[in-house]
Amino acid sequence: MNIFHILVKKEVKELLTRQLLVSIAAMLFIFHVIGKVVGTQNKATQARSGDVVVLDLDGSALSKNMVARLSATGYKVKTASFAGIEAALAAPEYKDDSFFLLFPAGLQKELDAGRKGGMGFYSKFTNFSASGTAGTVSKIRKTITRMNDELSVYVLGRRTPSLDADFARDPLAAREFVMVGGKLEQVSLAQALASIQSQIVFFPVAMFFIVIMAAQMVMTSVASEKENKTLETLLSSPVDRWMLVVSKLSASALIAGGLSGAYMLGMRSFMSGITGHTAAGAALPAQEALAKLGLLIAPSGYLLIGLSVLFCILCALSIAFILGVLSDSVKSIQVTIMPLMMLLMLSYILPLFIDINAAPLYVRLLLHAIPFTHAFTAPQNVLLQNNTQVIWGIVYQAAVFAVFVTLAGRLFSGELLLTLKYPFKKA
Amino acid sequence: MPIPALSAEKLGKKYGSFTAVSGLDLRIEEGEIFSLVGPNGSGKSTTLKMVSTILFPTSGRIEVFGADTVSEPEKVRKMISYLPEEAGAYKTLTGHEYLDFMASVFLRDRKQAAAAVKYGSELSGLKDKLKKKIGTYSKGMTRKLLLSRAVMIRPKLAILDEPTSGLDIINGYEVRKTIKQLAKEGITFLISSHNMLEIEFLSDRIAIIYKGQILACDTPVNLKKRFSTENLEDVFIKLAQ
């Protein structure tokens, strides 16, 4: 075994503590359990999503027909018999129901007279969970549209009996097209977005996680050597100082890679539990069109993204190494890591909310100057076929890495390593 | 004239405006046990760190067996072994793993490294405890392990900062005996200590250092004779006054 492997092995042993392994196992377990619980809960919510309590105070042929249409289109209709909606909402037999529909008395007469008919759509909060409330919102919108359609058909039928009411209501045969990077294909925007999301939804989260983990690893490695006073012995040994730097960076990258793999597994287990493997297949019918648009990442695209991620991690490691040198104890890492955290947060959060290319020049310059931004935006750029931008990003990241790793090596070769302390005070 | 194990000329070290070492001259012969004695902050540890190539002199120069510590640090590092004061060890490694790792770091030849680990294991006296993680060791056990590490590779120059700090009387005595034995085998020792009794027992020559300068340098017997005192403590007090 050569000296590099011996040093990396020692670093891995130092960093991969039992506590870390236990916390990773706990994280995987928690992700799995949460996924299962949320998934089961969602299924139960979905099973109830078609439930609607109907109070028909109109009792007309129209309202009866509309209730029948609701049942025929998948709603589980519960017919209530009360004098007013308040009584229905408060009734114990409907305590678990959240969606109520009121056909007011005189609805048909109003429409026949050419006036708008008023219907009541009532929501009752039973909880504030994200999935529950989001589901209710979409259910109400869908039901309002359906009711409106039904009433349109009724009104058109009454006014112009010779007209095909279904045709008059929906005469448009819409064909959606999407253009990406100069290529045009017939596919819906929703399908294109679903495909993009399924490929890149976890990416920034995983990236953020891996970079933070790697940075903390290398900082811990350097700071603990200083704190435990093992560094001086190592520095007086015949091992090349650069070898010490590279071995620490390699061991940290290795463990961070393993941890992020575990994290991705956990997230996958979590999402599988929630979605029941449906998300990835959302855009399957349009696969061919999406592939032609380049919205399915090709192996060469994955290679570019991989390279960008690799250099992003290397940049973070080299910067963290220098910050580790400034930390005189493992505890002080919480403070010294802040500059790196801020850069990372900027490059992670801003591109989520703004279009970098349309942003003011100073924002673009700021974001592109942060080497991590290029990795966060790499999947988007690959999907948009801006491969040149990704390649330039990688070149820039490599240059930043070269600068910081040289600085780290110089720090390790000199005495500043033992005498410099945050915030840049000499001992 | 043989090449000295260590020679320092007009050695100086400043941290900003603070002068830690000033105009220090030293010459240590091969196989000699040489001690630096002085109070806290007198410049002992800084001098040892400069000899160990981890700090650079602000002025003057140091040579270890003819190799300059600033221009030829790699050459120097192959000949030395440094034990810092209050040094620690990797807590997640076992004692044996630590010795094995350090032997591989200092000695590239596998056979030499294996022999060094065997010697270091015996020297430490930790026996079965070498299989336990260093995190479970007492301060004394850790110090014994570190001392064994420092000398197991049989360096040409061993630099020991407070070698017996944290050791009980018996273990301290054993360590001093081992140092004497190794010196007879040809290893040169540069030691720093507060413990005057230990220094008197161990050293061939002593340099008394105060405020970064050497006040006197001679054998323990000559120093006591020169200052007409019973022990080295009194020599130091007289010099410091």
Image: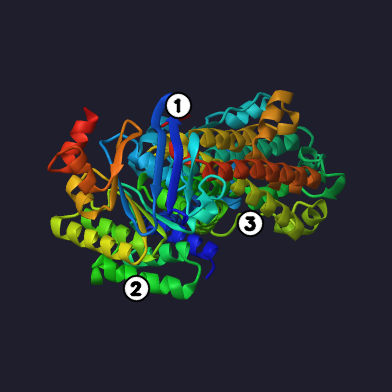
Which residue is depicted at the point 65% across and 58% down? A281
Q: Nearer the viewer, residue A212 or A37?
A: A212
Which residue is depicted at the point 36% across and 35% down? A90
**Res B213 quadrant in image:** top left
Q: Is residue B96 above or below residue A292?
A: below
For the C terminus of chain A, the image quarter is: top left
User: In the shown orientation, is residue B195 left or right of residue B96?
Assistant: left
**Of helix, strand and loop, which one carries label 3?**
loop
**Of helix, strand and loop, which one carries label 2?**
helix
Which residue is depicted at the point 18% across and 59% down? B173
Residues at discs 2 and 1 both on one chain: yes
**Res B131 quadrant in image:** bottom left
Q: Is residue B54 visible?
A: yes
Q: According to the image, label 2 marks what residue?
A: B118
Closer to the chain start, of discs 2 and 1, is 1
Q: According to the image, label 3 marks what residue?
A: A280
Give the amino acid type for the residue marked by disc 1 in the picture. Answer: Gly
Q: CA distance from mark 1 to mark 3?
A: 62 Å
Q: CA distance from mark 2 to mark 1?
A: 44 Å
Q: Which mark is residue B16?
A: 1
Q: Nearer the viewer, residue B224 or A329?
A: B224
Q: CA distance from mark 3 to mark 2?
A: 59 Å
Q: Chain under label 2?
A: B
Residues at discs 3 and 2 both on one chain: no
Give the amino acid type for the residue marked by disc 2 in the picture. Answer: Lys
x%, y% of residue A183? Answer: 86, 47
